[in-house]
Amino acid sequence: MSAKNIIVIMSDEHANKVLGCHGHPLVKTPNLDKLAADGCRFSNAYTNSPICLPGRAAFATGRYVNETGYWDNAHPYDGKVDSWGHVLRDQGIRSVSVGKLHYKNATDYTGFDQQILPMHVVGEQGDVLGSVRDDLPRRMKCRSMSDSIGPGESSYTQYDRDITELACNWIKEEAGEERFALYVGLVAPHFPLIAPQQFYDLYKDVDIPMPKAYAASERPTHPWLQQWKECWIHDEFFDDDKVRTALRSYLGLCSFLDDNIGKILKALEQAGLAEDTQVIYTSDHGDNMGARGLWGKSTFFEEAAAIPMIMTGPDIEAGTVCETPVSLVDCAATITQQMVGTTPEDWPGRSLNQIANEANDPGRSVFSEYHAAGAISGGFMLRKGRYKYIYYVGYEPQLFDLETDPEELNDIAGQPEMTSLLQSFEAELRSICDPEEVDGRAKADQKRLVDKNGGREAVVAKGGFGATPAPGQHAEFAGSSN
């Protein structure tokens, strides 16, 4: 039996590790844990690009970033490449969004029949500073990560409350006999790391350990990552107390998110639609949360690249865990396959329903790439079986054995016995794309955008604004250096 309807709930910056059902020792996520108990949790799910706009564009289009050219947070999705919403529209199926989309604007047709209280990029353009790739600037707005922490309210927490209420009302008042696909975009646990008091208090007396590999002597010294850290300078403004407060807030925001999801799922049950509706929960990417001295997203470590993926539906066996690697492009394929019975031939993803009902496939690869702020050159990731392979244009690769080293503390790429495996991974990567060509194409597009905005000096002087403001709020820029 296939589901009549689909609801996709996407959060922002929720690391896969920070779920009770994933085994996190501290976080309280009872509603997501129940969702997993009622369906299938994909334990090895990944974003196709660990930053907002490219990851969301991959989710929308079902295609990789190097195919579509939505490179960074200044190249937002604009509907010029068909999305799963376009596919549904062609079959007369209604699709509606509530909340954060982070596309170019609300007027370009991106596949939704209706956008309710959407968040889109600043000025239909976004973060142009992130397109400066030739000589990475120091992003001074990073200071706000450590300044805005602790218990309280922010425009984001109020926005999430509004999104939740509107989503519940839509389910109650608008969902009915007609088939639908409903997308709900929540912001938590995205920074600012300010958690409502009720949820911060869940962790206020908890002994929060310092992040792994936080000591300077333990941090990775890979030259690509070193340059990344000289751009994303969050950690320069943290001390140990601020680190622990920020982590308490992140946990609190995860519980706040969970509470809002619980309200949406309750509304679905009360409307009598739960049995006919497939629910997918996921996030656009994760968050480093101070591990290795890194904050935010934008790396391929598990904290930033691995995401939650939980699904329930009529043909999904309850209480199952699927270890086959999956990614956001599989979400797009799932929506089209379930709602119209087919997936576009040029999409690389497969239906999560099919994957969940098959034996675990350690031979399946998932692909991610990064061409945005802090990347001196293009980065590419393949996760296959026990290994994660990371290719940096112009730099040595990284290789991690996630079976023996799940915390990714030991890069084994330099071990002679790994040479054959590295060669195999590189060949597989090049069967997907030419990394050098993609890197050159991304940088050329980004340079044109920077030049259009007055050139490098003007863009760096204007700086960045950190998080995209909630509807009705204004972006606050902080000039960068270099």
Image (cartoon, rainbow, N blue to C red):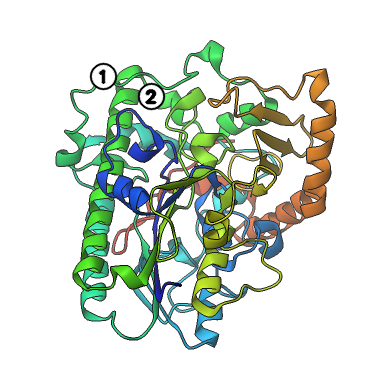
Residue 183 horizontal/vertical position (percent): 39, 67
Q: Is the C terminus in the top left, top right, bottom left or bottom right quadrant?
A: top right
Give residue 87's position: percent from left, percent from top.
56, 79
In what element is the residue under mark 2? Answer: loop
Any part of residue 370 in sight = no
- As helix, strand or loop, the secondary structure at mark 1 comes to loop
Determine which residue is flagged by label 1: 207
Residue 432 appears at what percent x and percent y?
A: 77, 54
Q: How crowded is mark 2: few (under 14 residues within 10 Å), some or many (20 or more)?
A: some
Residue that badge 2 annotates: 238
Location of residue 44 with respect to 161 vertically, above or below: above
Q: Which amino acid does label 1 sit on?
A: Asp
Q: Nearer the viewer, residue 77 or 333?
A: 333
Please give left or right for residue 171 compared with residue 14 in the image: left
Which of 478/380 is in front? 380
Residue drawn where x is 27% and y is 68% of the image: 167
Residue lying farthest to the top in this orientation = 217
- Which corner quadrant of the image does residue 473 belong to? bottom left
Q: Which residue is drawn at 21% across and 73% down?
A: 271
Label 2 is placed on what type of residue? Answer: Phe
Residue at 78%, 39% (x, y): give it: 425
- Is 154 placed left or right of 100 in the picture? left
Residues at discs 2 and 1 in contact (Cβ within 8 Å):
no
Residue 228 placed where, x, y %? 60, 33
Residue appearing at x 19%, y 69% in the figure: 270
In the rendered structure, the answer to whether residue 356 lies left or right of residue 446 reads left
Quarter that holds the N terminus: bottom left
